[in-house]
Structures are given as C-alpha cells and as structure tokens.
Image (spheres, grey):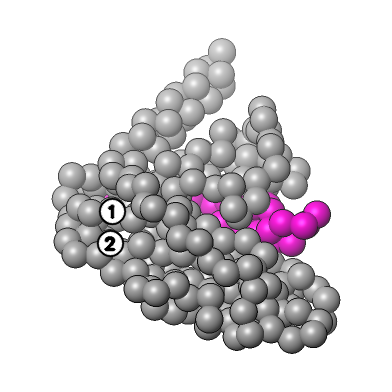
Amino acid sequence: MRARARLLATRLWCRTALAAALTWPILVAAQVLLPPRAPQAEQFVPEGWVLEQKQIADLNRDGRADALLLMRRDAQGGTPERLLAVVLQSRGGGYELAESNQRLVPHSDDPNQEDPMADGEIVVRPGGFDIKFTLLSGAGSYLTAAVRYRFRRQNGCFRLIGYDRMETHRATLDTRDLSVNFLTAAVVVRTGNAQSDAKNEQREKLKANPRRCLRDLDSGASFDPR
C-alpha cells in the first residue's frame, strides 16, 4: 500500500509540475506552405523567414546527402516562430520536401518568455535527427524544462521514437525527469532534488502508443506523451 501511495504521489507531483510548467501561451500561427521541390535546399525558405540552421546527413539512408532546415521568423515583443523541414535529395538532382512542422518549437507573444532555441540544438545522423529546446519563463513560473525529441525515418515518415523532458524548479531545485521510448512504450520518471543524489524512480508502460510523425506534432509546450 505504501509503495502504491508513493507511486500515486509521484504521478500527482509529475502531473502538477507539468501543468505548472506550461504557463507558456501557445499561439497558432497561419501555416506556411512550402514548395514540394526545389533545386537548392535554401530555396525552401519562405519569404519573410531566414534560415537559422542547416544540417546535412543521409536522413533516409539512400546514399545521398539530405538537409534538415530550421527556419525562423522574428516577432515583435515575443519569441520567434520556427519552422522545421526535412528535404531529401532527389536522384536526378534538387530536393524534395519530405515533412515539415511549424508548431513543434513553441512561439509566444509574451515578452517574459525566453527563446526556446537560445540554448537549443538540432543533431542529425544517418536515418534521423534530434531537436532540443528549453521552456523558460522570465516571470510567472519557477519551472524550467529542457525537452528533446528523437526522430527516425520509418515507413515513409520521420517517426517520433524518443522523448526526454528534464524539469527543474528554480526555487526549490526539485527535479523531475521523464523519458519515453515509443518503440518499446517504456516510460521512466525520476524525481529528486539537484542538491541531493537521492532519486525516486518509477517505471511504467504507455497505455496508448499511437504512431507519431514529425508533421503530426503540436507545440512542445503542451505535449504530454501519456
């Protein structure tokens, strides 16, 4: 009974922490249409946007160099909009748009919100990529969350296969780490405090595990895999 009570308390704390961290106002921007193909990867950048990062790798394992594009559109008094696109090099030359997402990296018009990609990164590898960003409010919340998504090319899409979320309460230094493996449906939650080595770990399985592709995901500020 005590073990069950601890498990329920941990889940309640995790849900509460998640809800508290998500004070980020989520904006739904008008979707930008990208061309289906272009001679150069840079030609997928829409008017009014800039190419923030371009990472090269064989993302679909066909022996050709593809590109992962992170594009940015600046906003007044808030955080920039971000658009992530995977473009695959064609056999005859040029590039074809495989998938894109304009919602995943959160965008806010609140000047108190920090830019999620200020300390973010995208990492490419043969067959897939990771994107990492941080949710941090300059006012209104003590919680900081570092989020990482892992994608792999599978069955015609870039499927979400892994998710990590590391939360820290800046006042109490309480921590909560969530790690999800979507291939095995395994979930690991670790809670503790940054000033102590003691950790409480809980393991479970996802009750529902739908296949999620890059194009399907909504804002990282509201994503809850469970």
- In the visual, does 10 lie left or right of 49? right
Label 1 vs 2, first from the N-terminus: 2
**137 or 203: nearer the viewer:** 137
Residue 112 in the image, given as x and y percentages of width and height: 18, 55
Residue 71 in the image, given as x and y percentages of width and height: 44, 72
Q: Which residue is at 33% across, 47% downward?
A: 27
Q: Which residue is at 53% across, 75% downward?
A: 44
Q: Which residue is at 34% across, 55% downward?
A: 107
Answer whether labels 1 and 2 touch (C-beta < 8 Å).
yes
When the figure is inspected, residue 47 is found, relative to residue 101, above or below; the finding is below
When asked about the image quadrant of residue 105, the answer is: bottom left
- In the visual, does 156 lie left or right of 151? right
Q: Quadrant of the N terminus?
A: top right
Q: Indicate yes or no whether the magenta region holds residue 165.
A: yes
* Mark 1 lies on residue: 108
**Element under label 1?**
loop
**Element under label 2?**
loop
When asked about the image quadrant of residue 159, the answer is: bottom right
Amino acid residing under circle 1 = Ser
* Mark 2 lies on residue: 79
When the figure is inspected, residue 80 is found, relative to residue 27, above or below; the finding is below
- Mark 1 surroundings within 10 Å by alpha-carbon count, few (fewer than 14), some (14 through 19), many (20 or more): many
When the figure is inspected, residue 75 is found, relative to residue 139, above or below; the finding is below
Q: Indicate yes or no whether the magenta region holds residue 154.
A: yes
Tell me the CA gap for discs 1 and 2.
5 Å
Q: Which residues are magenta?
A: 148-170
Q: Which residue is at 56% across, 57% downward?
A: 149
Amino acid residing under circle 2 = Thr
Residue 97 in the image, given as x and y percentages of width and height: 64, 68
